[in-house]
Amino acid sequence: MAKYQLSSATEKYLSDVRPMFLGGAWKKGSAGETIDCVSPIDGEVFAKVASASKEDALSAISAARESFDGGVWKSKTPAARAKILWRLADLIEKHTDTLAELEVLDGGKLHSAAKNGEVPMAAESFRYYAGWITKLEGKTTTISSAGGAPFHCYTEHEPVGVAGMILPWNGPLVMAAWKLAPALAAGCSCVVKPAELTCLSTLFLGELMQEAGIPDGVVNIVTGSGRVVGAAIAESPLVDKLSFTGSTHTGKSLLDAAKGNLKKLTLELGGKSPAIVLDDCDIDKTVAGVAAGIFSGAGQVCVAGSRAYVARSIYPAFLEKLKQHVLGIKVGEGFDPDSQMGPLISETQLSSVLNFVRGAVKEGAVVATGGERLRRDGYYMTPAVIVDADDSMQICREEVFGPVLVVQPFDDLEEVIRRANDSEYGLAASVWTENVGKAHGVIKQLQAGITWVNCHGLPDMAMPFGGFKQSGWGREAGLEGLMQYCETRSTLVNLG
Ligand code: ADP
């Protein structure tokens, strides 16, 4: 990629076909096939990674199983495991330049966001869970059923076993870290399948894991298709747990695959998250915040606030300011420091998003601004604001996963809460107001797993992340995220 100023480490990393990581060895893949890494920046192939066959996936699963059953990781002392995760976090920071450049080239991220947001968050994921390892304690409990006889009852947390992880393309590094960090903290062994479109930062993370001292076979990274590699992980009886982030459609299809051995499932799926703007909000801050809530990451974010409901009394003023704000968003490639919104991930994704915009217009909605493809290489479009929509329209009900915001007025709180909740999804929501009592009153009635007041989309490792309704099962981040990778054993000792 001579046209971008990459660090020499990144140039070197991209000069070879990147192998996958099986049982502690870097391998090309038994069928000798490769996947082209196409950059959303310009649509050009800039690297290649090995493409796994089903046999490769099965050998990764066996390696994880062997390492788990052999106890090379789970039997280390908590302090020893914590030290390795801390070392890994330090290595992630040390290699910030390469990881950030890979996220820009492969995932279409803005360089500033990758460097100052995604890479530090990946490092923080491992530090956060490194901290938990030495504090993952069971409880002693007092039982009643023995009528006061001398019994001692206690619980312990055990790693669930081999954890399969199927990653999405919209946050490759962070999603890998969000799953690997709690799984490793719990003592699991792992098989990771990155999305076909964005394998590179996960593979690079694998190299850092090896350098940090994670034993061979504990983390395996298999690059290949969802249909072959993802399905093999989902249906394998040797995998005890599956953590998936992606579309609700694919998430549902995993239920059948996982039922053979009743794998434990964590599913982080789609969303159609509302931003509720009350009449007493700070309009300028809210305009900027609501826009950031949908247009960051070009709207390819599961918690994107894609439906804005604005109090009718401020609707005209809000809309006018929003249009001006959105018109000012500079769309461009992530290495350009002036860019504020990058490309969509692929031609397919761009066409899908543009089709949603066209569909909205066909159904009678109006494009207030944006929604057009840019005439340049790569997959760019202008951020879109849609008005005059109706809650029944596809644009208000389905996840677009692109930079498209529908703005609608509302008249009273009861109405807006009902409309906000009228969705099969229940991932996230935000409320914008200067009245703290009203904010909490509204939040309490929202069917959403993550809610924000006067901000939208900010994640934190200490904040459990996941959805109500068809947005998924389970939570990532926080102690709840760690418990997804643990089983609890209760023991009752008769002291009599
Ligand atoms: P998208 O359609 O935007 O790629 P998906 O939810 O289909 O979103 O993809 C998320 C992840 O799921 C990717 O890693 C993909 O390879 C994987 N995947 C897709 N189909 C399957 C499947 N049938 N079984 C397991 N994993 C799958």
Image (cartoon, grey):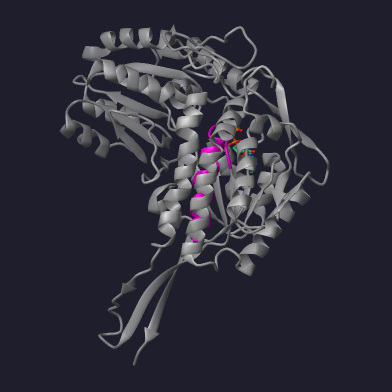
Stretch in magenta: 167-186
Q: Is residue 21 left or right of residue 122?
A: right
Q: From this viewpoint, is residue 237 visible?
A: no
Quarter of the image that includes the C terminus = bottom left
* Residue visible at 19% across and 26% down in the picture: 434
Give the x, y percent position of residue 335. 55, 20
Between residues 34 and 15, which one lies in front from this camera angle? 15
Q: From this viewpoint, is residue 43 visible?
A: yes
* Residue visible at 37% across and 75% down in the picture: 154
Give the x, y percent position of residue 128. 42, 50
Q: Is residue 284 left or right of residue 41?
A: left
Quarter of the image that includes the N terminus = top right
Give the x, y percent position of residue 238. 65, 60
**Quarter-wise, where is residue 218 in the image?**
bottom right
The question of residue 420 being in magenta is answered with no
* Residue visible at 64% across and 69% down in the picture: 70
* Residue visible at 44% across and 12% down in the picture: 329
**Quarter-wise, where is residue 469 in the image?**
top left
Between residues 137 and 256, which one lies in front from this camera angle? 137
Ligand 1 sits in which quadrant? Answer: top right
Q: Main secondary structure of the magenta part?
A: helix
In the image, residue 357 above or below residue 125 = above
Q: Is residue 22 left or right of residue 213?
A: right
